[in-house]
Image (cartoon, rainbow, N blue to C red):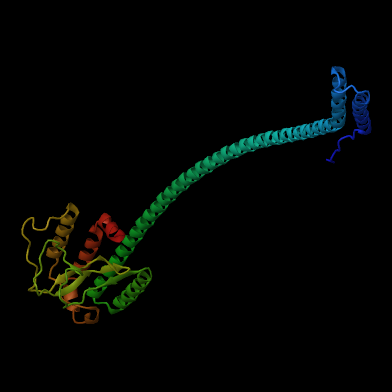
């Protein structure tokens, strides 16, 4: 804002009146002195003092008026500045009010955003929990399904292994019957057939094995028809009645053997080896088959067919029937448990 100047008051009339009043007082003094009226009387003194006083007042009055006008102008300027400052304060107040309103709006929006974010987070947590539960249920269902499939596969594996073992047992029994019959052509054909069947079984991991006549009796690889009998310490194998089997490196069934003459197993004490009902029946049947044979089995191998042909003629069907009876009386449940283990 431009600086305002105070109005100028003309001073010459005041100075003129001052000069006239002073001149009047001087004339009064001179007239009194000229007429010899000295000292002056009261009225002359009064007029002289009044003139001088009025002259002094007229001389000072314009400066007083200018000062008063300047003071009023300064007050007006200060008042204007105060009004402007008040207006600025009002503007600032309105701006503060607007800022407060904007801040309040922003605060409300932030609260709404926080609530929305909280709802979204809760929704995501609920969805994640539901998805986790769904995955857990699906995983449990899949595990149960896989467990059922594994059980089915194990059961089917046990069944076909059992069938394959039965087939190989019967083939071995046929081969032993052919050996004891003394017909070399039949022995050769059945021997080739048995070897072919064993090669097929080896491809799936089932390996049949036969005890070598004359080797020491091993309770881990050999077994007797009488499961309760205790063989002598130096007992030796005379003949293999039924093959033993191992599946993928694990023993499935020991070979059923007989011992050489003079090394018969000692009968076990009563209740020394408790067995199941199926085991007792199988033992009794094997014992009856051995007792019903005309002569005890002798030691022989496939390479000694000619040396044992006479003995085979005496007992052409004894060991073959024992092998078939042993294969037929094997408990399916026990075989399945062996295959599964």
- Residue 278 at x, y percent in the picture: 19, 54
**What number of labels is visible?**
0
Residue located at (24% from left, 75% from top): 179
Question: Which is nearer the eye, 8 or 262?
Answer: 8
Is 261 situated left or right of 220 in this image?
Answer: left
Question: Which is nearer the eye, 332 or 324?
Answer: 332
**Which quadrant would residue 42 be assigned to in this image?**
top right
Residue located at (84% from left, 26% from top): 53
**Vertical comparison of 87 with 255: above or below:** above
- Residue 37 at x, y percent in the picture: 89, 21
**Vertical comparison of 50 with 122: above or below:** above
**Vertical comparison of 300 with 205: above or below:** below
- Residue 245 at x, y percent in the picture: 27, 68
Image quarter where the N terminus lies is top right
Question: Which is nearer the eye, 289 or 45?
Answer: 45
Image quarter where the C terminus lies is bottom left
**Which quadrant would residue 80 be assigned to in this image?**
top right
Residue located at (85% from left, 29% from top): 56
Is 110 situated left or right of 87 in this image?
Answer: left
Question: Which is nearer the eye, 57 or 220?
Answer: 57
Residue located at (18% from left, 58% from top): 282
Is 158 situated left or right of 33 in this image?
Answer: left
- Residue 90 at x, y percent in the picture: 73, 32
Q: Residue furthest front?
A: 36
């Amino acid at each position: 804002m431009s600086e305002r100047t105070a109005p100028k008051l003309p001073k010459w009339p005041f100075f003129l009146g001052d000069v006239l009043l002073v001149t009047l007082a001087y004339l009064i003094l001179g007239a009194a002195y000229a007429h010899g009226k000295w000292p002056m009387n009261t009225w002359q003194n009064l007029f002289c003092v009044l003139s001088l006083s009025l002259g002094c007042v007229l001389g000072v009055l314009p400066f007083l008026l200018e000062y008063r006008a300047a003071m009023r102008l300064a007050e007006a300027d200060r008042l204007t500045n105060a009004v402007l400052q008040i207006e600025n304060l009002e503007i600032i107040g309105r701006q503060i009010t607007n800022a407060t309103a904007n801040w309040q709006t922003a605060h409300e929006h932030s609260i709404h955003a926080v609530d929305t974010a909280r709802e979204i987070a809760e929704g995501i947590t609920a969805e994640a929990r539901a998805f986790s539960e769904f995955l857990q249920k699906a995983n449990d269902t899949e595990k149960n399904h896989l467990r059922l499939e594994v059980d089915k596969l194990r059961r089917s594996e046990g069944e076909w292994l059992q069938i394959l073992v039965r087939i190989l047992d019967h083939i071995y029994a046929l081969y032993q019957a052919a050996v004891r019959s003394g017909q070399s052509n039949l022995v050769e054909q059945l021997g080739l057939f048995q070897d072919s069947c064993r090669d097929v079984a080896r491809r799936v991991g089932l390996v049949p094995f036969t005890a070598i006549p004359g080797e020491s009796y091993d309770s881990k690889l050999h077994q007797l028809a009488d499961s309760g009998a205790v063989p002598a310490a130096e007992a030796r194998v005379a003949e293999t009645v039924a093959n033993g089997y191992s599946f993928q490196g694990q023993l499935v069934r020991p070979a059923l053997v007989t011992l050489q003459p003079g090394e018969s197993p000692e009968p076990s004490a009563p209740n020394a080896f408790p067995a199941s009902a199926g085991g007792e029946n199988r033992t009794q049947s094997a014992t009856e088959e051995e007792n019903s044979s005309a002569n005890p089995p002798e030691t022989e191998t496939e390479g000694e067919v000619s040396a044992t042909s006479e003995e085979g003629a005496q007992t052409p069907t004894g060991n073959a029937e024992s092998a078939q009876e042993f294969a037929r009386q094997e408990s399916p449940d026990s075989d399945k448990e062996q295959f599964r283990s």
